[in-house]
Amino acid sequence: MKIVGILLVSSLALASAQPQGFFGGLRNFFGGQRPRGGRQNGGGGCRANRPNYSFGGRDYLVSWRDGCTSFTHGEGASFCRSAGMRPISLDTPQKEQHFLGLVSRERQKYFWTGGNVNHGRNPSIRWASGATTTSNAWSHTGGANRPQPDNREGNEFCLAVLNNFYNDGVKYHDVACHHRKPVICEA
């Protein structure tokens, strides 16, 4: 009985130390799922599930247009899957130019893409579409005042588009995947 009590107290201590708080920690401990990303409105999730934008004959879901602005990279991918889509692949010069322009026109600070960064000698991006590309859209600076991708936090494998965040224009940045941003999904 003592062992069960110790395990229960330890579990409660662990659950309360989790960033989602005591009850969220208990939900995770007992197998429940965390709410999907989206608005931080006291536990409400993001319910957008339909395309709200078109480009080049394809449909997209621009999450910030529906008030959904706070996903980790993984939560953004799950959000897109729940809508029958995937995070956007900026795998052609036309798509890259168009969506970098969109974030600027709509004065959005940033968004997640479906890209994963390879920090090799010649940095490349592996897209959710399966394509691998290189780009000239990398920023010349970032949080450590170094050209991107800089892997500043040591685990910056996810690709975000930042809108003049470092007085650098609309550019690609490698970002640790736990940061929170809106996402663009594509059909």
Image: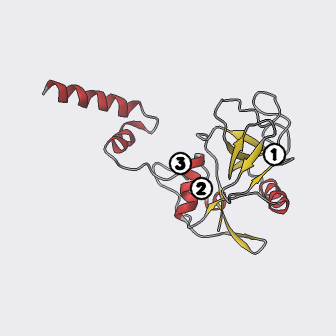
Which residue, given by chain and number where applicable, does mark 2 sit on?
A: 68
Secondary structure of the residue carrying numbered label 2: loop
State the image coordinates of residue 120 (x, y, percent, origin top left): 75, 37
* Quadrant hosting residue 53: bottom right
State the image coordinates of residue 100 (x, y, percent, origin top left): 81, 54
At label 3, the amino acid type is Gln
State the image coordinates of residue 128 (x, y, percent, origin top left): 66, 56
Residue 78 falls left or right of residue 153? left
Question: Do the CB atoms of the residues marked 2 and 3 lie less than 8 Å apart?
Answer: no
Q: How far apart are marks 2 and 3 (CA)?
A: 9 Å
Taking the view exactly as shown, the residue that stands out farthest to the bottom is 57
Q: Which residue is drawn at 54% across and 56% down?
A: 78
Which residue, given by chain and number where applicable, does mark 1 sit on?
A: 171
Q: Can residue 166 be seen in this view?
A: yes
At label 2, the amino acid type is Cys
Q: Quadrant of the N terminus?
A: top left
Secondary structure of the residue carrying numbered label 3: loop
Label whose residue precedes the other's in the sequence (1 or 2): 2
Which residue, given by chain and number where applicable, does mark 3 sit on?
A: 40
